[in-house]
Amino acid sequence: MEPFQKTIHEVSADLKSKKISSVELTKNVMDHLEKVEPKVQSFITVTRDEALRQAAEADKRLASGSATVLTGIPLGIKDLLCTKGVRTTCGSKMLENFMPPYNATVVERLNAAGSIMVGKTNMDEYAMGSSTETSAYQKTKNPWNLACVPGGSSGGSAACVSADQAFASLGSDTGGSIRQPAALCGIVGLKPTYGRVSRYGLIAFASSLDQIGPFSKDVEDCAIMMGAIAGHDPKDSTSADVPVPDYVAEMKKSAKGLKIGIPKEFFPDGLNKEVSEAVKKAIEELKKLGAEIHEVSLPASPYGLAAYYVLAPSEASSNLARYDGVRYGLRVPGENIVEMYSKTRAAGFGPEVKRRIMLGTYALSSGYYDAYYLKALKVRRLIKQDYDKAFEKVDVIATPTAPNPAFRFGEKTGDPLAMYLEDVFTVSINITGMPGLSVPCGLSKSGLPIGLQLIGKPFDEATLLRTAYAYEQATDWHKQKPSLREG
Amino acid sequence: MPVENYEPVIGLEVHCELKTATKLFCGCPTTFGSDANTQVCPVCLGLPGTLPVMNKKAVEYAVKIGLALNCQIAKYSKMDRKNYYYPDLPKAYQVSQYDKPLNFGGHLDIITKDGTKRIGVTRAHLEEDAGKLIHAGGKAGRLDSSDYSLADYNRGGIPLVEIVSEPDIRSADEAYAYLTSLKSILLYIDVSDCNMEEGSLRCDANVSIRPKGTEKFGTRTEIKNMNSFKFVKQAIEYEIKRQAALLDKGERVVQESRLWDVTENKTKTMRSKEEAHDYRYFPEPDLVPIILPESYVQDIRKSLPELPSAKRARFVSQYGLSDYDGGVLTSEQELAAWFEEGAKQTKNAKAFSNWMMGDMAAKMKEQDKELKDLKFDQKKLCELVELIDAGTINSKQAKEVFAEMFDLGVSPAEVVKSRGMAQVSDPKAIEGAVDKVLAENPAVVADYKGGKQGVIGFLVGKVMQATQGKANPKLVNEILKKKLDS
Amino acid sequence: MALSEKDVQYVAKLARLEVTNEEVAKYTQQLANILQYVEQLNQLDTSNVEPLTHPLDMKNVFREDVVVPSLTQQEVLSNAPEPQSGHFKVPKIM
């Protein structure tokens, strides 16, 4: 097995035991990254030189005994996290040459842990999408079938881990943008509880929904990444001051006695048969491991997508207003400032972004605020009440992550609504702020991954990891590797 | 209709920059006058990914303002985004407060010629300031003729409290009184420098008129760009007349924003102001609500100093000053403190205050001196008051003594001694001079005896002359009268 | 509440997005579809429901009034499309 094929916990042991140095490991990863990159196209920016410099630093730390489990480990970073001195594009022409003069808090934390950044990963523009097709730069391919999408918006972050171009990566999740690509690429992806991880330095899409989370090859790596990035940040007023548990220790506890809720609303009649079967089989497996399966109902949850498509674009329309050509980013000249604003934003944003900005502007505008935005905020509370009630009975809720395995390029781009429906199982917990994890639970007949979504109580990522770990260790989906072929 | 037949209805919006050390949402300093864009960080520049964190002190100062203006302090308050495009606004939204302001339902009292009047304060809310624009390339610094503008974000993010009055103001004079009263309060509670030239106090006026005796509000205009209270008064006076003239002609007042033009002394339309903004207010998702416990509010209330109106009332009752004098002395906290320190050391606080407001104020203005520059202290001024009350010197002499004390810092007793100014109050000495003057002015004496009692003043003057101004004028008067009437 | 092309033009103007006539037509259709989907929210009775603006029940997050170093002028202007004498230059506002 090549070093780049291993997991963090495996290769970290190798670094500790001096079987390999960080510089050697990084070279190994970067060579493989560059070899498969023409096929997968995970990265907008590859930072080879900087990675090797960081690796040399890591080796010093490893030698001095002040290393952490992440020291010397190459990781991918989604291109909406600000990285000082490294361009951060958000997948948009608007920020093609934007060099942040500061690091996002999660980047600072990973730097402090001594990890290595191999590059900035591709994404749907401004995190708006479910296939990474709206990126202004390139299309990322699903390593399991290069003719299919990796999911979105964190498609690059998912693909690079799936294709062993990095041991793990960071993505962001506003409506499902970590979990859905994780499911479509056959890896683990976690959206933490809102407030669990600092948003400082995360280029905002929808402020009350966005969260940063890890992609990893297995659940233990996910726990390791969470341990590094979670925790209160005084720079983020919405960051919760809640202690961070030892996720790796918690994860190893048995699944026996865990109460798992199955909401009927997430298994509608028309659900893709392969997805439905794989997920049901996974639930059976959990039962065999000693978990109790309960039926729960979340009656308002089907309205989550509609509420999401009011709340997210509304906040986005305000968050993206600052891209006006004055202080940074693209500027298209104009006779006067209004012309400059309008031409700049017309040229800098793609159609999906424009659609959502207009939708959000409309929903917030005078005369419509009550009917749309305020209404959605109220539905939000109803959905939360449903989950709170269900969690009185159960510890974890299990559902499919995505309504289908990876689809082909262009299949859903004709109708915005068709693409939005990709998020139908993921959005409701962005709205309520609860944590959610996707773990691989099967392959379709055509060899495309299917994901099991586990939803937890606020700040109970530990139980999600515990449930996922028990399932994972009883199966071998996490050991399957993609073919990197077109089919 | 003559303009007096219209009733002006005026509301004032005052923006007060808080003198916190740092901005509202980040740790950048708030110092005025630094080089452009040297007090800016990723947060106040609105760089992608940045987030606001509320300044504790700004909330404290805002609550202070609310309490000083007799407002109710909101039990639940939140920030909202006000969305619009302008190059001085880095995020293309201003974080302000919409429907749940920190302070609401207050008032402040002003002194008018008809007595005290209460002006309602609708709300006083917290918000962040925008950056500054320099308009260049056209007619010196004017927005409407510039080719381009230059943005400096040093000021962006500085905390402001916007104080909105009820439309209770009925004249330019009342507006002026409101502003001076408000400024005085803000300085007393030490939350702002209140410097209109530096922009730490700004005022916009909403003006409309209606025929006297009617209830319906007329169309109002908003007047901006007035950077002194004097200009506010002038602008409002002009605007009232302008609107009256329009209505008299049967024309309508257009609802618009107008600028005060200081060179032409007129209000003018702000050309090409956009259609009414749709600010699309919604709760700021990057900040959490402010829920202030009662104990917090009480602590701030306890920390407030005695406010101008309370101090004025106390000066009137405690020191026997007139309402007007009380008002003058309490207009500035330092002045009031200076007075009170002196009033404690004298039996005649009224006289002490008269010297302060009269000769002392005049000389301070003439020599451009502040209280801290004075060469004498309250003790010396009290000494002067005592010398006069004891009859040692008369009021004319006192003026000379005061001048020397002010210019050189010498004690009044010293001056009197060294100049041998002690007033002559010995009746025998005065009688001599009186007899001489009476003998030398028989015609005037005859006039007096003939009924023209007023001519005694002339005779008093002559006696004063004869005694080199040293005679006690009161005694001179008495003795003259006695001799003339006998 | 059918969305019209006039609405889209108004909203594009508010959002400072220059749009061609074809784009207006296309966006109107797409946005109308989405809004149609969103209409289903009205199936839920929210008459006695308080809006939930924050997923977390947090309040009173403050920082001390202490100065922290700012960026240098150069850093502030480092991404500026048109820096001029320490400022950000913008075209005519009026």
Image: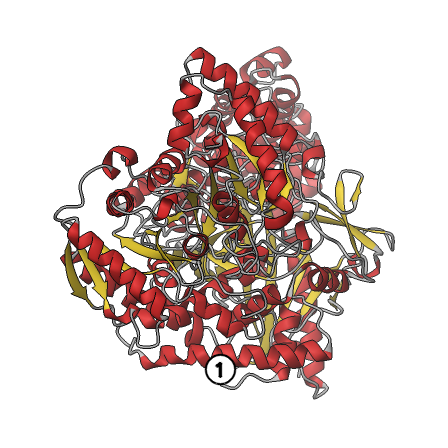
Left or right: residue B180 versus residue B258 is left
Left or right: residue B361 versus residue A426 is right
- Chain for disc number 1: B
Q: Which of B449 and B183 is in front in this view?
A: B183
Q: Three-letter amino acid code at disc 1?
A: Glu
Residue A272 image-quadrant placement: bottom left
Q: Which of B456 and A169 is in front in this view?
A: A169
Q: Where does the image place residue B396, in percent across and percent down from the top left?
A: 62, 30
Residue under label 1: B215
Callout 1: SS: loop
How was the colour assigned to the protein in this rendering? secondary structure
Identify the residue at the far bottom of this view: B250
Residue at the (83%, 56%) spot, across then down: B146
Q: Where does the image place residue A84, in percent across and percent down from the top left?
A: 60, 35
Q: Where does the image place residue B356, in percent across and percent down from the top left?
A: 55, 34
Q: Residues within 10 Å of mark 1 (few under 14, many from 20)?
A: few
Seen in the picture, residue B96 relative to C80 is either above or below; the reply is below
Seen in the picture, residue A9 relative to C9 is either above or below; the reply is above
Looking at the figure, which quarter contains the N terminus of chain B? Answer: bottom right
Left or right: residue B418 versus residue B119 is right
The count of marks equals 1
Seen in the picture, residue B379 relative to B100 is either above or below; the reply is above
Look at the image and tell me whether residue B119 can be seen: no
Q: Nearer the viewer, residue B220 or A218?
A: A218
Look at the image and tell me whether residue A341 can be seen: yes
Q: Which of A252 and C64 is in front in this view?
A: A252
Residue at the (20%, 52%) spot, across then down: A286
Q: Where does the image place residue A16, in percent across and percent down from the top left?
A: 41, 19
